[in-house]
Image (cartoon, grey):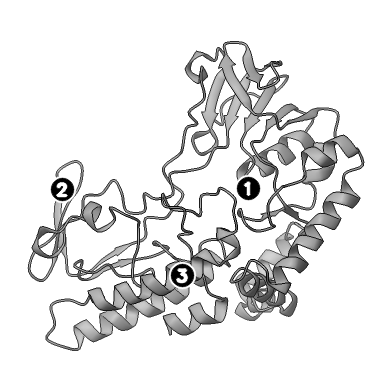
């Protein structure tokens, strides 16, 4: 994509050419799988797959499955496969705080009611208990010593203490960092599955992978048939691998040389009429992405109105506005729970959280 006076010239990988006055980059965040750099991975004689590139044709019956990774995907996979009786070895580099939030299925009657009535959907979407939890979390993250974060950690700690009977396993599963420093995991049944005889938890780390399976840092070989790599994504990709050149040929790679950033998570100086959804510093882990996208669209829509109702060829955040926003955001981000001292995919290469550092209302107000 190249900005050409008053529009974007666009060329696809197969040579198709197009143009547009406005480019809205809804390219997502978690879409470039991260394959772990573990010695011997390529030597594994079984089948190794990233969870985002899973071969659903594989029959797991009778297979011994190793799951590497302990984020949301790793926890969900272990819980699901463990419940169905599969033989699981779960390798986790660091344990997670688990929030015991219930999960349930909607009946066909429920779904029919939702299809027929917006009010029935809104009754759930605007449920007071749900929003109380959202506001507790989004207010709590702004200060890693906040009362709300202490309350969240107390809920998670009590869940661990009461749900895990075996004291040895309980200590294996006890985090050493503050709750919500890493993306908080929501699961009401992971702990019960982790205690099943067909599920083994390994926290000593991985020394290497050999054809037969995984050798942990205690030197123990765990024979495996399948390796599930729940190892996350390259979270600094955003629009990449698209090549984008803005005003005066400025390359987005230069704009993002230090860190990925955008004014209000929407606009990048020198890149007119280029708007990001879920871009750098969006509240990706703070509250519902549906709500985020809708509010960001409201912000973009009023920008488009300003361009279409004037003689302007484009609109873009000024360098001064961008610098002021980033200075304020970085200072606030370092004080959030995400900056309280753990490693996570929320951090950029300099160790600064790349997330929205203020509460829900601040985001709603900014987008309005």
Q: Nearer the viewer, residue 153 or 118?
A: 153
Q: Nearer the viewer, residue 147 or 104?
A: 147
Q: Nearer the viewer, residue 84 or 221?
A: 221
Residue 168 visible to the viewer: yes
Point out the tag, 1 or 3, that comes first from the N-terminus: 1
**Callout 3: helix, strand or loop?**
helix
Residue 193 visible to the viewer: no
Distance of label 1 from label 3 (alpha carbons): 28 Å
The 10 Å Cα crowd at callout 1, few under 14, some 14 to 19, many 20 or more, is some
User: Which residue position holds label 2?
Assistant: 16
Q: Quadrant of residue 218?
A: top right
Q: Nearer the viewer, mark 3 or mark 2?
A: 3
Q: How many marks?
A: 3
Q: Identify the residue shown where x is 36% and y is 53%.
A: 238
Distance of label 3 from label 2 (alpha carbons): 43 Å
Which quadrant is home to the N terminus? Answer: bottom left
Q: Identify the residue shown where x is 41% and y is 42%.
A: 32
124 lies above or below 107: below
Residue 117 rendering spot, x and y as whole percentages = 63, 77
User: Which residue position holds label 1?
Assistant: 72
Q: Identify the residue shown where x is 85% and y is 33%.
A: 196
User: Which residue position holds label 3?
Assistant: 331
133 lies above or below 197: below
Q: Identify the residue shown where x is 57% and y is 37%.
A: 230
**Callout 1: helix, strand or loop?**
helix
Q: Nearer the viewer, residue 361 or 350?
A: 350
Which quadrant is home to the C terminus? Answer: bottom left
């Amino acid at each position: 994509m190249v900005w050409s006076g008053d529009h974007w010239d666009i060329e696809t990988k197969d040579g198709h050419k197009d143009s547009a006055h406005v480019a809205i980059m809804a390219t997502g965040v978690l879409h470039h799988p991260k394959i772990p750099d573990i010695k011997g991975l390529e030597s594994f004689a079984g089948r190794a797959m990233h969870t985002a590139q899973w071969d659903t044709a594989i029959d797991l019956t009778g297979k011994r499955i190793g799951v590497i990774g302990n984020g949301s995907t790793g926890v969900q996979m272990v819980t699901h496969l463990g419940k169905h009786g599969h033989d699981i070895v779960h390798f986790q580099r660091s344990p997670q705080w688990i929030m015991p939030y219930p999960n349930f299925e909607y009946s066909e009657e429920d779904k029919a009611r939702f299809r027929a009535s917006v009010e029935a959907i809104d009754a759930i979407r605007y449920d007071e208990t749900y929003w109380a939890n959202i506001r507790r979390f989004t207010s709590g993250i702004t200060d890693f010593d906040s009362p709300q974060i202490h309350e969240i950690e107390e809920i998670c700690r009590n869940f661990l203490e009461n749900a895990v009977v075996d004291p040895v396993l309980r200590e294996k599963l006890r985090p050493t960092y503050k709750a919500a420093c890493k993306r908080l995991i929501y699961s009401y049944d992971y702990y019960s599955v982790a205690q099943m005889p067909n599920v083994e938890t390994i926290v000593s780390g991985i020394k290497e992978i050999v054809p037969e399976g995984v050798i942990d840092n205690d030197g123990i070989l765990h024979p495996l048939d399948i390796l599930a790599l729940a190892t996350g994504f390259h979270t600094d990709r955003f629009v990449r691998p698209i090549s984008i050149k803005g005003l005066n040929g400025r390359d987005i790679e230069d704009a993002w040389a230090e860190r990925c950033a955008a004014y209000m998570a929407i606009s990048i100086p020198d890149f007119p009429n280029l708007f990001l959804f879920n871009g750098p510093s969006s509240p990706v882990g703070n509250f519902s992405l549906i709500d985020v996208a809708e509010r960001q669209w409201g912000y973009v829509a009023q920008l488009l109105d300003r361009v279409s109702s004037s003689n302007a060829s484009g609109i873009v955040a000024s360098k001064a506005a961008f610098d002021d926003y980033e200075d304020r955001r970085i200072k606030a981000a370092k004080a959030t729970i995400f900056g309280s001292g753990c490693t996570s995919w929320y951090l950029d290469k300099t160790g600064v959280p790349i997330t929205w550092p203020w509460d829900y209302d601040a985001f709603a107000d900014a987008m309005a």
